[in-house]
Image (cartoon, helix red, strand yellow):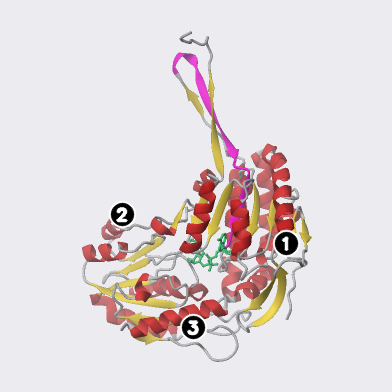
Amino acid sequence: MFIQPIASHFIDGAYVEDDNGTPIEVIYPATGTIIGRVYSATPAIIERAVESAKRAQIGWAKLSGTERGRVLRRAADIIRERNYDLSVLETYDTGKPLSETLCADATSAADALEYFGGLAGSLTGEYIPLADGNWAYTRREALGLCVGIGAWNYPMQIACWKGAPALACGNAMIFKPSETTPMCALKVAEILVEAGLPPGLYNVVQGAGDVGAALVSDPRVDKVSLTGSVPTGRKVYASAAAGMKHVTMELGGKSPLIIFDDADLDNCVSGAILANFYSTGQICSNGTRVFVQSGIKDAFLKRLCERLDLAVIGDPQDEATNFGPMASERQLELVLGFIKKGKEEGARLVTGGNRISGEGYYIQPTVFADVSDNMTIAREEIFGPVMSVLDFEDEAEVIIRANATEFGLAAGIFTADISRAHRVIDELQSGTCFINSYNDAPVEVPFGGVKMSGVGRENSKEAISHYSQLKSVFVRMNDMESPF
Ligand code: NAD
């Protein structure tokens, strides 16, 4: 199987190749075999991408929002029509099971294009009446050239969660996918052009951190939106700050999921499974510190193990599979390292814990119990299918422990007590919270973190403020007064 994209980059409305760049092999995580090759962007490619985006953005911003939105909504329709083929591609890119990609990736990308396409025509400023008949108005204007940099876990979704609001507001975007998953964003670019997007407005360039860094530091770039780890976020934020650029940072997490004694057992087990094993645990908002109140702990662990036995691990392209491999060998090794640390530091391995023999980067769904707050597996983001179960006794205690982390992306609570649910959520230092649920991410709802987990929000009307800026215009209706 070889799925070679037409070329590595998509610039100014067309595929572009430059094989002077460093080769990047595309590896199918289910087999470990090379299925494609792209080349990292050379300085000449970056220059073409920036130059065409800057040129195209001027005319795009002059269209009405309704005209811009029409293009995005058309692209959403095309993505939905091709959901099956795009999902197969996403599965080759990431190794995520087709049963997931069919409902969570291209569809989520289409939702973003449809939602921001719908909002584009409603972006307006304000009329502000002032004293003496004077007044002011505001104009919501595009930022200019936005750079999007993606992680490897949701390549098509990330390409659109950044691209859709940027384009809706009249910006151009250069998107750099993760070097681990270079293929899906090219399809997004191709479909946008097919939907009528003028050339240059959504360019895709390939490469690793060096290409990302070159884009972020380019003085012609006005905004940077990164989805990635905290260490990368620190570097990108610092570089963007030097040029006083706007930023959105969607970074890592070690989110708490709190299960009280009175929670419905099957619902909280389902929540914990979704919060730890969907996408083989490679989700930034995962609730990987599962705090379980002592009264429900034994029943929770028993039912959890019964349910994990039902996981269908295998060929991700088989729709019956619901648990796939890790996205890369590197990620597999990292996760195995965390499991080893968990054992060494005294956590009790309840289930899993091993690599699955055979080809591909498969690892068992893994649960540790009796985890204490200071263990490495309770403090550091693992980004793999490893759940840490921590015991707790009362509400006040669990709030303090849940907040005792540098991260603040997400948090969840399962309880039958509605007052307690809101009381606890009020106290949690997290940007994206769930009550009797976990990891829902509809486009209408702001998504993002606090503390080290990020800056800004994606999705929802809130994203508009991160891809546009206000111009205030004061209008005097009477004569000027001046001291001289
Ligand atoms: P990463 O930080 O290694 O890389 C992210 C992206 O940044 C890649 O495209 C990479 O090439 C690029 N990059 C690396 N160094 C750079 C630099 N100096 N300048 C510019 N770009 C640079 O992250 P990853 O391993 O690809 O993804 C996993 C991480 O992403 C996890 O920490 C996860 O929590 C996080 N993530 C966050 C969200 C969110 O929305 N909050 C979503 C998905 C993943």
Left or right of 291 in this view: 7: right
Residue at numbered disc 3? 311
Q: CA distance from mark 2 to mark 1?
A: 45 Å
- Label 2 C-beta lies within 8 Å of the nearest ligand 1 atom: no
* 138 in magenta: yes
Left or right of 5 in this view: 483: left
Disc on res. 356: none
Residue at numbered disc 1? 9
Numbered disc 2: secondary structure: helix
Q: Earlier in the sequence, mark 2 or mark 3?
A: 3
Q: Earlier in the sequence, mark 2 or mark 1?
A: 1
Residue at numbered disc 2? 426
Q: Earlier in the sequence, mark 1 or mark 3?
A: 1
Magenta range is: 131-150
How packed mark 3 is, by other alpha carbons closer than 10 Å (few <14, some 14-19, many 20 or more), is: some
Numbered disc 1: secondary structure: strand
- Tell which of 296 and 236 is nearer to you: 236
Residue 429 position by quadrant: bottom left
Amino acid carrying mark 3 in the image = Ala
Amino acid carrying mark 1 in the image = His
- Tell which of 49 and 182 is nearer to you: 49
**Residue drawn 38% across and 81% down?**
341
Amino acid carrying mark 2 in the image = Asp
Report x, y in % for residue 174. 65, 54
